[in-house]
Image: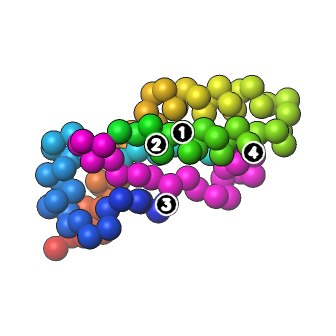
């Protein structure tokens, strides 16, 4: 999975930002569920002073526009997308930190 918003940051800087309230957030795609997860969703690093609304809104409209293809399941997928919009996404901070620490063991 691609992690956005960490370009140019060292592991030390990422750890400091996470201690200050930063987190790794993912917004699920309806498209991934329809095609058996061929396209993995992006993960965003949200800094302590940044909100998740701009990322959530983009994914909500993407899910809303793509959901018409699976008509019987449309209300379920749109409701799930709206739930994650209101919740602020799925928090993957611990998982991503473990992965980054295992890849950057110096």
Using the image, determine if residue 87 lies above or below residue 49. above
- Mark 2 and mark 1 residues within 8 Å of each other at the beta carbon: yes
Disc 1 is placed on an element classified as helix
Dot 1 or dot 4, earlier in sequence: 1
For the residues labelled 2 and 3, the Cα–Cα distance comes to: 20 Å
Q: Residues within 10 Å of mark 1 (few under 14, many from 20)?
A: some
The residue wearing badge 4 is 66
Tell me the crowding category of disc 3: few under 14, some 14 to 19, or many 20 or more residues within 10 angstroms, Cα based. Answer: few
Q: Helix or strand or loop: what does disc 4 sit on?
A: helix
Q: In this figure, which residue is indicated by the disc labeled 3?
A: 1
Query: Residue at the location (21% across, 46% down)?
Result: 18
Q: Which mark is residue 54?
A: 2
Neighbourhood count class around disc 4 (C-alpha, 10 Å): few under 14, some 14–19, many 20 upward: some
**3 and 4 marks in contact (CB < 8 Å):** no
Left or right: residue 64 versus residue 97 is: right
**Considering only order in the chain, which callout, 3 or 2, is on the residue closer to the N terminus?**
3
**36 falls in the magenta region:** yes
Which segment did they paint magenta?
30-50
Residue furthest to the bottom: 106
Q: Is residue 28 visible?
A: no
Q: Earlier in the sequence, mark 1 or mark 3?
A: 3
Callout 3 secondary element: loop
Which image quarter: residue 48? top left
């Amino acid at each position: 999975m691609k992690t956005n918003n960490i370009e140019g940051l060292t592991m030390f800087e990422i750890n400091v930002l996470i201690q200050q309230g930063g987190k790794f957030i993912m917004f699920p795609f309806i498209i991934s569920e329809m095609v058996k997860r061929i396209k993995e969703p992006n993960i965003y690093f949200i800094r302590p002073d940044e909100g998740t609304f701009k990322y959530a809104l983009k994914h909500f409209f993407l899910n809303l526009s793509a959901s018409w293809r699976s008509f019987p399941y449309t209300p379920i997928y749109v409701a799930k997308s709206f739930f994650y919009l209101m919740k602020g996404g799925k928090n993957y901070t611990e998982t991503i930190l473990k992965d980054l620490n295992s890849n950057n063991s110096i």
